[in-house]
Every structure is written in C-alpha cells, then in structure tokens.
Image (tube, coloured by chain):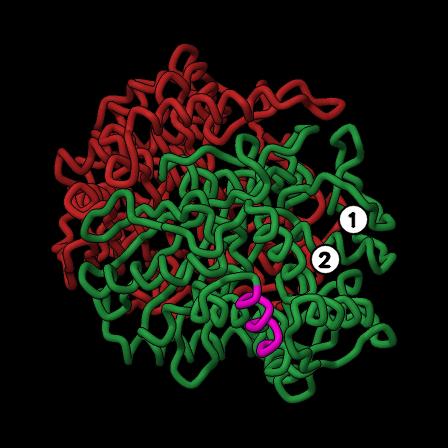
Chain colours: A red, B green
Amino acid sequence: MVEAFHIKEEDAVRVDGEELRRSTIAIFEKLGVPAEDSSRAADVLVTADLRGVDSHGVSNMLKTYIERFGDGTQNTHPDWKIVSERASIANIDADLGLGIIIAPKAMEIAIAKARDTGVGVVTVTNSGHLGMAAYHAMLALPHDMIGMCMTAAGASVLPTFGREPRLGTNPIAIAAPAGEEQPWVFDMATSIVPVNKLHNAHRMGSMLPPGHIADSEGTPIMEPILAPETFDLLPLGSTREQGSHKGYGLASAVEVLCSIMSGARWATQLPRWSFRHYLAAYDVSAFSDINEFKSNMDEWLRELKATPTAPGHDRVLVAGQPEHEMFIDRTANGIPLHHEVVDWFRSTCAEFGVACAI
Amino acid sequence: MVEAFHIKEEDAVRVDGEELRRSTIAIFEKLGVPAEDSSRAADVLVTADLRGVDSHGVSNMLKTYIERFGDGTQNTHPDWKIVSERASIANIDADLGLGIIIAPKAMEIAIAKARDTGVGVVTVTNSGHLGMAAYHAMLALPHDMIGMCMTAAGASVLPTFGREPRLGTNPIAIAAPAGEEQPWVFDMATSIVPVNKLHNAHRMGSMLPPGHIADSEGTPIMEPILAPETFDLLPLGSTREQGSHKGYGLASAVEVLCSIMSGARWATQLPRWSFRHYLAAYDVSAFSDINEFKSNMDEWLRELKATPTAPGHDRVLVAGQPEHEMFIDRTANGIPLHHEVVDWFRSTCAEFGVACAI
C-alpha cells in the first residue's frame, strides 16, 4: 500500500462492518431499491471497506449512489434484459440499473453458462458504477470456477503522448480458487491508480509518487507532487519508456470487450454515470481435474510467497493477500473511517430516517 | 519504439520477406516438419519480421527452433490431442509440438466453438515457443471475431519485492477487427520488455532505460545501464510505487489461465522449452451487430488517433499501428537483418542444402 492513500490514524473512527452494513441496507431501501438488491449493494460496498479498498467502499461511493438515484440517472427498479444470447454468452441492457446490483446478476448468468459449456461471458451496457471489480469476480469462487470482471468508465486517463483523456481507469479483476490457501484475487486499474485514490489523497493533503498524473499539457510529472483537486491520470507504465503504451492498450482492450463488442458507445461518448461491464466464468473442471487444480494453486501460491526477498522487504505477496489480511483485521477491529465521513453518514441516516448503528 | 532495441542502419542488410519465407520453409522441411506446418511456421516468423517485431522473427528464433528439433525437445510430428472438451472449450496436449505450429490449430478450434456458442477458449499444454502472440490472435480477424492469445513461459521475471525469478514474460495479445481502419492489434509482454529485446540490446551494446532489470539482489535499477548478458527482468510497472504489482499480477493471471487451469505445471517446474498457451475467439455477431461494431471501431480508433498531443510528440498511436506501418515499409523495402544474422542464415541454408534466396 502506498502511503499517500492511507487514512491517518488520528483522523480515523473505527466502525463495525455489520453495523455499517445494516444502516447502508436501510438507506438503499429508503431510496426505493428492492430489499434483496439493497442487501447486495451494501454487501459490495462493505466488502470493499473490509478488504481495505477504501476507494470503492461506503465512504467514497454511497454519496454518489444516493445522488444518482435522486436525480434519476440511476434506476431503482431497472427493467434490465438480455438483448442477445447464445449458449455461452449474453449481452444485457441494464436500463440504468446500478452496476453493483446488476453485475452480480450478470455473473450468475455467466456461471450458469460456464457450467453448461465450460465458459460463460456476459457483457452489460447502459449500467451504473460497478464498485470493486474483484467482488463480482469472486462470485465464481464458491462454484469452483475462475471469475473475471472488467468495467469501462468515463474518460479520465491520457493515451500515451496525448494531452486529453480518452479512456477510463478500466479495471481488470480475476479470482481463482485454491485449496488450503486463500483464493488468488487480482484487481487492478489499468491506469496508474483509480480516480478515487487521488481524490482521497487530495482530501488528505498527501504527496503523490512520481508518474501518477500529467501536467496541463499532457507531460507526465515524474517528481513527487501534492495531490491536486483536478488531474489527468497516466496509464499504468507512466511513460512510454517504462511501458505506458501497455497500460493504454489494456484500458483500450477493456473498452473493446465491455463497450464496442456489446454495441455500446465508449468513454468520451457517454455521460459519466454510464458504465459498461464484462463478466466471465471458467468452469475449471471442464479443463482439468478440480482437486489437482486446487493443490497446484496451493503449491504455486506458496512458492511465490516463499520467494527470497530484495533488500528492504520482508516478504513477497500474492494478489488478494493484503486485502484478505485487511479483511481479517477489519472484521475483528472495525473499519477506520475518516471522522468527517462518520459525521456525514450519521446525518445521512438522520435525513433518511433510518437507525444509525455506527 | 525504444532506441535501445533498434538495429543500427550501418549493421543492417535489407532482405526480401518472400525470399526469407521460401528459405525458412525449406529449412523447416529439411528438419522433418510436414509441408503445411513448415509454411505456417515460416509465416509466423516472417510476419513478426515484417511487423517489426524483430525479437520474435527469423533472426532471433529460427536458430533456437533448429536446436530444439535437433535435440528432440521439440517434436516435428507431434501426436497432439484434445484431452478435455466441452461446447465452448478444449484443452490440448501438444506432445511437444512447436507452439508456432500448434497454436494456429488451437485457434481454429476456438473459432469454430465461438461460431457455435459465442465464445471459444482453448488451452494448450506441453507445447513449444509460441512466437509473436499477436499472430494467433489475428487469425480471428477474417472471421469477424475478436481473438486473444496468451502464453506462459519459463521463469525470467521477478515478483514485486522478490530477488529470484518466478514468472515468465507471459504476453497478452488481443486483436479486434475494424471497418475502414486497420484492425486494433495489441500485444504486450507483462514484463517490462520481452527477454529477446534485452538479448538484442546486449548484442548491440545498447543502454537500457531505467526500470528494466534488477540488480543481483533484486532491487530495481532506476538509472540507464549498459544492457548486460544476464539479467532478471522487472514486471510492467518496474517498482511497487509505479505499479509493478500489476505487471506481476498480470503475469500471474496468464500463468493461472494457461497453465494451472489446464492441469499443467508452471514456470519454475518445467524445462525452459515447455510452454502453455491460452487462445480465445469471440464471435462479435453473437453480442451485437457486426456492421455497427466495425463502424464504431473505426470511429473510436479515429478519435484516439486525433487526440491532441503532449509537447514533443506529433501523434497519438493505437495498438498495432506502428506494426502495420512497419509491415507496409518492410514489405516494400525489405526486412533489415544484422549482417551477422544474414551470414548465419546463408551458412544454415548451405548446411541444410537448401537454396538461399536472400
């Protein structure tokens, strides 16, 4: 974890995840979201908080979701439907439903298709914010499947050599089950960091590491800099010499598979609240023996974790490990929220007339 | 293109691609490879040379392939077979066939499954070197499909904070058709660069940009350095602060999908000549209207290329564009090979008793 994006301990109030969940469900229900969908939405948010993905938890996202349900840019009762389907794929029009609610339904379809044919791919257009992409990929794990989730977002990232943003932060998440080890859960923005991490850094008055943003003319800033209020993000790689064309290309791949393949428009052509998703499930047992797979995953993960370290580092991590460790800690000790967020949450509960458990 | 990896004009001899192809086919046939497979193998190599992907062309790879057929680590007549199959997936044991020959056959199966079910995924284990990954992804293009190709290779890349290599350069390639524009063709190593690019840089006595390799203890070298003979590669991102955990995670994802999902072992557990592949095809027309897709691809690609530029740069490129421009140039003006490579090729032709057209 990079220091710039951590909440300072003196600003933090620890709140209980289950209590945060209860109040969040109640707020969604007051907004008019059906009970089951409200539970799902709260689960996506609180799971992000518990895993330490603060950028996608209650504190960063709930306010936006409330606004979008309020101004009608998001539908509480979307008439979502499959507009195109084959044995192993489906393409869904989400009717402006919220991504955190629609994506799990799409993933269920992908899982069913994977069970039938080996792999299932479901695209979603006309949707809302997806939340933490790993959440949806992880839905495949209890089915002994590998899950994948990507989403294409509004333009905030510069293409290599460009001075105007053309692509979203377009994350890619993949989750694979293991046996005795924790599942391998990978979730990366194809930009250098997600937009919300920079908003948090700005709010906290933090310095940014080199290679995160460009100056107003599009030149990558390669010195530490105080996090500004507005910015254009660099793709993963930061500069051409260090591979920014790869981050730019990965973001483009996400746009092609989420948006253009499914007949949707793209980052620059849509309002900021309109998102496109791609969800996939692979039935491992269609390819090979699931028990051998799990024991191989265990052995491979243990080997990676046992890699001798470079000076100044005490361990090599695998994807999902820091988030799982954070999950254990925060489940036991609570989620550290900024005291201003706690104040906002309490006043929001009061406004909606729901009991505030935190 | 980064200067360190370019052949110097004064060292180059321009050779005709078709003549290079003819002699390469003849060499494969003399090695005992069937005629059709020899043509395919030569096409993969010469296509890489024509597209400017010198690291994966005749000059860098043919010598290795000759050695591997010679010492029996690669089979000229592999008894490759599908070991597991469902409606939209297959898993192939390549019986030590060469990847450049087996992968196109696997892609044909993926394409047929995509036509039936919307998407097709084929994994290949016990295979040889794949060549340029984009080649196989591009096989989907004439079918109005999106192609994807990945391969897991021997350990040469450090995990973030590690001092011993645990993963291969594990490239990811995706090709999507367009209408009037050239297809979008993306092909990246998940390491900072492919191994062969560094071998070329060493041979040419070039300086490496910062962030390409680590010192002997695993610490990323963040200054320019003369390309050494042996090295451990850094993942895309170079350092943790600039996202090396993402390059490391992407390389791991390729290992999971190519190797572990298909029941194979992985980078550190296999000899260097043993590769695992993943090929996929998406039938665009299963998701949306193919004509609308192509016109959207055209519009999106033109918009990216028209992005205003940062100072010092005259254009924003899209994936596959430099390679296509190189293809036009080299088809017309020949492929620049190092004069030592030309000498080696001529003596190899003599050794095998085949006419040397270059």
Single out the residue that lies furthest toward the front.
B353
Q: Is residue B331 above or below residue B263?
A: below
Q: Secondary structure at mark 2?
A: loop
User: For residue A49, which quarter of the picture?
Assistant: top left
Count of numbered circles in the view: 2
Q: Which residue is mark 1?
A: B210
Pointer 2 with pointer 1, Cβ within 8 A: yes
The residue type indicated by label 2 comes to Glu
Is residue B77 in sight in this rendering? Answer: yes
In this picture, residue A100 sits left or right of residue A160: left
Is residue B247 in sight in this rendering? Answer: no
In this picture, residue B21 sits left or right of residue B297: right
The location of residue B323, given as percent across then percent down, is: 59, 73
Quarter of the rendering occupied by the N terminus of chain A: top right
The chain that hosts pointer 1 is B
Q: Which mark is residue A241?
A: 2
Q: Is residue A290 above or below residue B83?
A: above
The chain that hosts pointer 2 is A
Residue at the spot 22% in from the left edge and 51% down from the top edge: A97
In this picture, residue B57 sits left or right of residue B9: left
Q: Secondary structure at mark 1?
A: loop
